[in-house]
Amino acid sequence: MSAKQERHALTDFQKGQIVALRPYFSHHKIGSQLGIPPRTVSGFSERLDNRQSIEDLPRPGRPHKTSAADDRYIIRSAESETRVPLAELRLDMGINICEQTIRRRLREAGIRKWKALNRPLLTKQHAAKRLKWAKTHRSWTVEDWRKVAWSDECAVQKDSDPRKLRVFRRQNKREKYAPKNIQGKSKAGGVSQMIWGCFVGDKLGPIAFVNGTVNTQVYIDILENTFLSFVDALRADGITDILFQQDNACPHVSKKTTEFLENAAREHGFSIIKWPPNSPDMSPIEHLWACLKLELHRRYPDTKYLQGSPDTVRRTLCERLMEIWWDIGEEILNSLIDSMPRRVHALIAAGGWYTEY
């Protein structure tokens, strides 16, 4: 089999997209937007300039089993029923063609089956609230977002390495399941350590380690013993108008926690920002956890193989996480805050539904 990637003819729709974008973007930019190799875009543009037509010259070989109308119907069906298996899609359409032909037509249009992304479940009510929140904050500048104290909890498992291992192998089951090509993972991720952290602008806040789960009283203790002293230190440095952010987890929004936060906000001079439901994509601290886990396993590759009792492993995790947390640089925090206007605009563009963040 040739090592070169299989090439497919451009569909009329793809050609129309290229023609529409040519006056405004480079061939490379058009290819990136449409998922088409830039060389294909350049070749089509050159032929268009020479022949003044988007039609391809006649080619030898077996003609398509489907008409142009069939092709459009296949594409519309796949786009409207994205979750339907290929075999079921074929039956639903009622066209006398095999699955391979349907697959080939979809690939010619740049469509194939992908693994669905995992995101928090959103309802129409969630999306409406998220959209309302985004519109309320659409005019906020980066400087406005620098006043937010981002907070969250995270469970760090000893083998929670976010890096994906890639191996060289042939496309067969024998090599696919060979031990040397498997990235082992212990059941339930092994021992884990719960942590709470926060940051404001380019300033890291304290990190707290939690034994067990986070309930209302544990959460209040974290805020009272960790967060409030951080707020006082910020105010002493002249940083005022701080907005405390937390998600809508049950311990965060319980009656007891709400009363505690309202009293603490009055005494320590900060406000509480109302947060939309199921919106980790709007919270940059979620990405900070990913950085923390990545650096943990980059700096200490033996983390996933730590031996000893659960308490011994957790102590080691705490020592390493504490070290890595305070090594997080200002450039990372600044880049996260700089992304906030883009996140809000992306949420508005998505109508309150899922974004790329």
Image (cartoon, grey):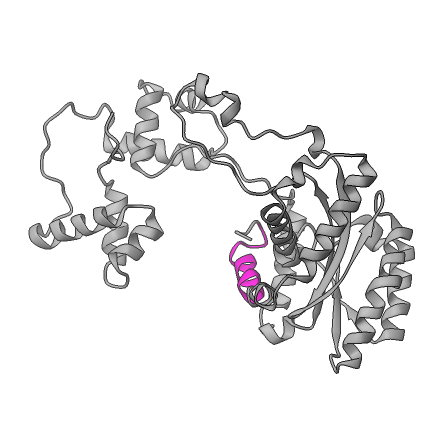
Number of callouts: 0
User: How far across and down, in percent of the image, does residue 5 sit?
Assistant: 27, 35
Magenta segment range? Answer: 340-353
User: How far across and down, in percent of the image, does residue 339 sit?
Assistant: 55, 64
Q: Quadrant of the N terminus?
A: top left
Q: Is residue 349 magenta?
A: yes
Quarter of the rendering containing residue 107: top left
What residue sits 9% from the left and 38% below the top? 57
In this rendering, position of residue 110 left or right of residue 337:
left
What residue sits 73% from the left and 79% below the top? 239
Residue 275, relative to residue 278: is it above or below?
A: below
User: How far across and down, in percent of the image, does residue 316 sit?
Assistant: 75, 45
Residue 353, relative to residue 329: is it above or below?
A: above
What residue sits 33% from the left and 22% below the top? 100
In this rendering, position of residue 165 left or right of residue 108:
right
Quarter of the rendering containing residue 155: top right
What residue sits 40% from the left and 32% below the top? 77
Closer to the camera, 220 or 319? 319
